[in-house]
Image: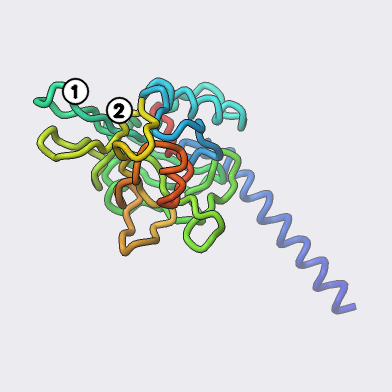
């Protein structure tokens, strides 16, 4: 009898978690996700427009409608004088929730100082976990082209950090600055700016622990 009672209580608890999770997601529509797949052409995303379109396509396929999606990507100056566009300036003001209705950050300050971004919460558009450090393959390198605070690199900061503003898939040439969605690896816990890739081809991105995934945010 006790076994039956325990089973009933276990089932009831599971149903409660499922229902409350669904309610949370309904109350707080998804406004943040890591892409479940890459464009597949290394650092050549078709520029910011191509990256935004990729975010939008995946979000809509997951059932998100009526939102303006932006990839969390910075660009670099092409004139050597002005600063490029910063990722943090592209994504709206928040708040942002993941696909399970969990709060990621209430505003831009929290997002860059103390966000709820770890492997458990940095989910894809379908609510699935992205592979990270310790998984095979490790895919925790997320393209950002950004500094730790989400800003673009200055012209005098040497190097290509954006694979030619997201238009290059050159093998061994250029680089893409990446963050770690699981906040682990190489002694760097930054979700925005952990290190640069070895180049801009898809194989180059894989070799440093990535797959060409993006962070996507609802900007409205």
Can you say whether 218 is above or below 104 in the image? above
The numbered disc on residue 70 is none
Judged from the image, the secondary structure of the residue bearing numbered disc 2 is helix
Left or right of residue 196, residue 219 in this image: right
Q: CB under 8 Å between callouts 2 and 1?
A: yes
Q: What residue is drawn where x is 53% and y is 50%?
A: 130
Residue 45 location in percent, x, y? 42, 27
Q: Which residue is mark 1?
A: 78
- Nearest to the observer: residue 150 or residue 30: 150
Can you say whether 53 is above or below 205 in the image? above
Left or right of residue 117, residue 79 in this image: left
Q: Which residue is mark 2?
A: 165
Q: Tell me the quarter of the image containing the N terminus.
A: bottom right
- Nearest to the observer: residue 19 or residue 42: 42
Residue 63 location in percent, x, y? 61, 29
Q: How is the image coloured?
A: rainbow
Q: CA distance from mark 2 to mark 1?
A: 9 Å
Q: Quadrant of residue 170?
A: top left
Neighbour tally class for label 1: few under 14, some 14-19, many 20 plus, Cα within 10 Å: few
Residue 122 location in percent, x, y? 48, 49
Q: What residue is drawn where x is 38% and y is 40%?
A: 143
Q: Tell me the quarter of the image containing the C terminus.
A: top left
Judged from the image, the secondary structure of the residue bearing numbered disc 1 is loop
Q: Residue lying at the far right in this picture: please name it.
A: 1
Q: What residue is drawn where x is 27% and y is 51%?
A: 113
């Amino acid at each position: 009898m006790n076994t039956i009672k325990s089973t009933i209580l276990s089932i009831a608890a599971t149903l409660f978690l499922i229902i409350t999770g669904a309610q949370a997601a309904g109350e707080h529509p998804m406004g943040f996700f890591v892409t479940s797949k890459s464009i597949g052409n290394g650092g050549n995303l078709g520029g910011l427009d191509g990256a935004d379109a990729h975010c939008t396509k995946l979000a809509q396929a997951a059932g998100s409608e009526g939102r303006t999606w932006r990839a969390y990507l910075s660009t670099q100056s092409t004139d050597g004088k002005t600063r490029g566009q910063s990722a943090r300036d592209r994504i709206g003001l928040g708040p942002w929730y993941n696909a399970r209705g969990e709060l990621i950050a209430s505003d831009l300050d929290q997002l860059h100082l103390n966000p709820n971004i770890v492997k458990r919460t940095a989910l894809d558009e379908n609510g699935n976990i992205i592979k990270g450090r310790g998984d095979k393959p490790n895919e925790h390198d997320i393209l950002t082209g950004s500094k730790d605070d989400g800003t673009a690199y200055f012209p005098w900061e040497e190097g290509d950090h954006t694979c030619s503003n997201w238009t290059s898939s050159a093998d061994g040439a250029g680089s893409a600055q990446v963050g770690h969605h699981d906040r682990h690896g190489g002694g760097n816990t930054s979700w925005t700016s952990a290190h640069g890739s070895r180049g801009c081809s898809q194989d180059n991105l894989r070799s440093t622990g990535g797959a060409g995934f993006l962070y996507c945010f609802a900007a409205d």
